Image (spheres, rainbow, N blue to C red):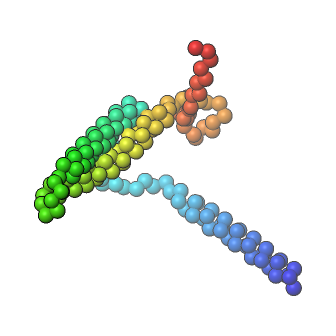
Amino acid sequence: MKKSILMLCVIFLISMESKAQQERQFIVSNSLSTTKPVSFSVPTFSGPDKDANFYMHRSKNYRIVGWSTLGAGLVASGAGLLLATNSSNDFYNNSNDDAAAVLFLVGAVSGITSIPFMIMATTYKHKARAMVSSQKTGFGVPANVSKDIVGITLQIPLGK
């Protein structure tokens, strides 16, 4: 009984796999059409190609914005703390305390706002470093594949 159930499961799995392969082959053969779709949209200009200089410039801009918002947040929080410590011991006069709290919260929000800018600056710096040039190759590449491939250069400094 156990052997027959196991055999039925194996046959069922094999038939499912063969059926899935046939359906995928049918979809692929139908997706190859010789007609081109007609489009009435105006092609948009995507701008200049993004190279390493573009990403380094963007990284620099984001880093400047990140450091500026962090500095402004530290100054505002510091001013809020100074106002809070300079207030009198009178519990009924809390006009400076409200201003100190607002300044401290604005500084904290500004400091937290700088975090995404710093992260994006680092991301763009990594993208700039990862940019590689296309290199021509012709050996072992099929005829229908582009001869431009991505290449990575590894430099090992020897000595001084």
Which residue in the rendered view is the most extreme toward the front? 89
Quadrant of the snapshot with the N terminus: bottom right
Q: Return the residue nearer the eye: 104 or 147.
A: 104
In the displayed orientation, state which residue is furthest to the bottom. Answer: 1
| Image height of 12 relative to 125, above or below | below
Image quarter (top left, top right, bottom left or bottom right) of the C terminus: top right
Q: Residue at x 63, y 38 (%)?
A: 142
Report x, y in % for residue 120.
Answer: 38, 44
Closer to us: 155 or 77: 77
Q: Is residue 151 left or right of residue 79?
A: right
Is residue 129 visible in this depiction of the protein? yes
Tell me what residue is drawn at x 61 percent, y 23 percent: 156
The answer to whether 55 appears left or right of 146 in the picture is left
Looking at this view, is 149 or 31 the one in front? Answer: 149
Q: Residue at x 56, y 32 (%)?
A: 151
Residue 48 visible? The answer is: no
Q: Camera-side residue: 10 or 79?
A: 79
The residue depicted at 45 percent of the width and 55 percent of the height is: 35
Where in the figure is residue 12, as x and y percent of width and height? Answer: 74, 76
Q: How many marks?
A: 0
Please, is residue 42 above or below residue 98 in the view?
A: above
Residue found farthest to the top: 160
Residue 7 horizontal side relative to residue 60, left or right: right
Task: Write down the quadrant of residue 18 in the picture.
Answer: bottom right
Dividing the picture into quadrants, the one containing residue 22 is: bottom right
Position of residue 119 relative to residue 139, above or below, is below
Query: Residue 38: x, y in percent?
Result: 36, 55
Residue 60 in the image: x percent, y percent?
Answer: 34, 34
